[in-house]
Image (tube, rainbow, N blue to C red):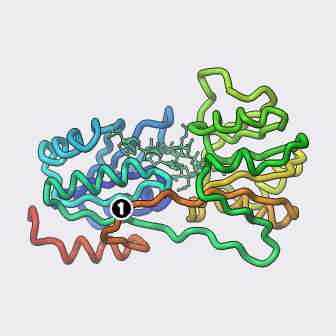
């Protein structure tokens, strides 16, 4: 057995530790989106595969027998490619999926189908927006330049930002409630923008918004291919145990 673990999330890192503890032969894969990703206790590769064809070739070259997709729910391109490549290579694939966040009493959430729908949902009057969606899609908000944007990024942006009024803070989660309440108070935030990532690593800003009585504009997840789903690391281990008839 030789597992490809598509990572980049808290759950992927926890699964990597479980694989290492149980002696599961696996390769951890990052896209290379950040300058210095967290080290993993597994052999690690960084960078794209080169689309579906590149992934099919990699799976053969590296003698992969199983693929675990533990990427972020918004990493839809990777999930679609993994599904197509494993179908072509006739390899077993499972996706480790964390539940979407659900609003609870005291939350003031506006749910939008896509991130692209959020700028139009912001007020016209100048506001102070915590844009907690990373770096890749900041450009969408150039449509509303009148707001002050607090940007939490993993790495210092190389290029100039497409927004005139920003404050950048560099931080790699997981984040905590006290820290996010203090951050949002310090910057007098009036609106929070988030993706429905689920999980624990990015949830603090939502609890902070509730505590401060702030509205949250939240993008729903993109559609992902149907297939075998694990809700936690234990279910992945069970799946691997039931699929040991390959590559042993
Ligand atoms: C490169 C690996 C671990 C994984 C930690 C999780 C938690 C902290 C919260 C906010 C939201 C955001 C962002 C976020 C979180 C975890 C997890 C998660 C959100 C690292 C990592 C990589 C990335 C890529 C990065 C994206 C960006 C998104 C920042 C490492 C730290 C906003 C998603 O600068 C960039 O280009 C950043 C790009 C994709 C979304 C975007 O579109 O900009 N994640 N994040 C992975 C790779 O190369 O394959 O550097 O160590 C991983 C983590 N980020 O091991 O503990 O599991 O969700 N990541 C979102 O949820 O909206 C921050 O600020 O409140
Ligand atoms: P994406 O849009 O779904 O994928 C775009 C391309 O990036 C893929 O086609 C693939 O390139 C490459 N790629 C993505 N994930 C990869 C991985 N784990 N290993 C190797 N190549 C990968 O991806 P994304 O949304 O930019 O996310 C990139 C990484 O950041 C993923 O690891 C994801 O888990 C993590 N992340 C993303 C978010 C988010 O909000 N999107 C949040 C937290 C963490 P090729 O086509 O060349 O193979």
Question: According to the image, label 1 marks what residue?
Answer: 225
Percent position of residue 93, x then y: 26, 63
Give the quarter of the image for residue 179. Answer: bottom right
Give the quarter of the image for residue 3. Answer: bottom left
Is residue 169 found left or right of 155 in the rendered image? right
How many numbered tags mark residues here?
Answer: 1
Q: Is mark 1 within 8 Å of ligand 2?
A: no
Structural crowding at the residue carrying mark 1, measured as other residues with C-alpha within 10 Å and reported as few (<14), some (14–19) or many (≥20)? some
Question: In the image, what residue occupies the spot 53% across and 59% down?
Answer: 221
Foreground pick, 247 / 24: 247
Question: In the image, what residue occupies the spot 77% across and 54% down?
Answer: 180
Quadrant position of ligand 2: top left
Question: In the image, what residue occupies the spot 72% across and 39% down?
Answer: 151
Is residue 125 found left or right of 216 in the rendered image? right
Q: Quadrant of the C terminus?
A: bottom left
Question: In the image, what residue occupies the spot 65% across and 58% down?
Answer: 112
Q: Is residue 225 above or below residue 104?
A: above
Is residue 63 found left or right of 84 in the rendered image? left
Q: Is residue 177 above or below residue 115?
A: below
Q: Quadrant of the N terminus?
A: bottom left
Percent position of residue 178, x then y: 79, 59
Percent position of residue 197, x then y: 57, 59
Percent position of residue 103, x then y: 70, 72
Foreground pick, 228 / 123: 123
Is residue 2 found left or right of 192 in the rendered image? left
| Helix, strand or loop status at disc 1 | loop
Q: Is residue 50 above or below residue 76?
A: above
Foreground pick, 215 / 173: 215
């Amino acid at each position: 057995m030789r597992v490809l673990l598509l990572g980049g999330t808290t759950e992927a890192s926890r699964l990597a530790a479980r694989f290492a503890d149980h002696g599961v032969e696996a390769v951890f894969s990052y896209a290379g989106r950040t300058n210095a990703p967290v080290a993993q206790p597994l052999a690690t590769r960084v960078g794209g595969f080169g689309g579906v064809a590149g992934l099919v070739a990699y799976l053969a070259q590296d003698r992969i027998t199983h693929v675990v997709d533990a990427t972020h729910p918004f990493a839809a391109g990777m999930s679609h490619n993994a599904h197509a490549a494993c179908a072509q290579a006739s390899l077993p694939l499972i996706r480790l999926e964390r539940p979407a966040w659900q609003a609870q009493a005291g939350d003031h959430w506006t749910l939008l189908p896509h991130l692209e729908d959020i700028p139009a949902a912001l007020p016209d009057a100048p506001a102070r927006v915590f844009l907690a969606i990373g770096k890749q899609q900041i450009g969408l908000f150039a449509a509303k330049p009148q707001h002050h944007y607090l940007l939490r990024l993993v790495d210092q942006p190389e290029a100039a930002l497409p927004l005139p009024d920003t404050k950048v803070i560099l931080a790699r989660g997981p984040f905590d409630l006290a820290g996010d309440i203090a951050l949002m108070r310090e910057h007098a935030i009036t609106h929070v923008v988030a993706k429905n990532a689920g999980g624990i690593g990015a949830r603090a800003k939502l609890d902070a918004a509730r505590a401060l009585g702030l509205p949250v504009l939240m993008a729903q997840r993109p559609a992902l291919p149907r297939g075998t789903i694990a809700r936690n690391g234990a279910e992945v281990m069970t799946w691997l145990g039931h699929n040991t008839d390959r590559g042993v």
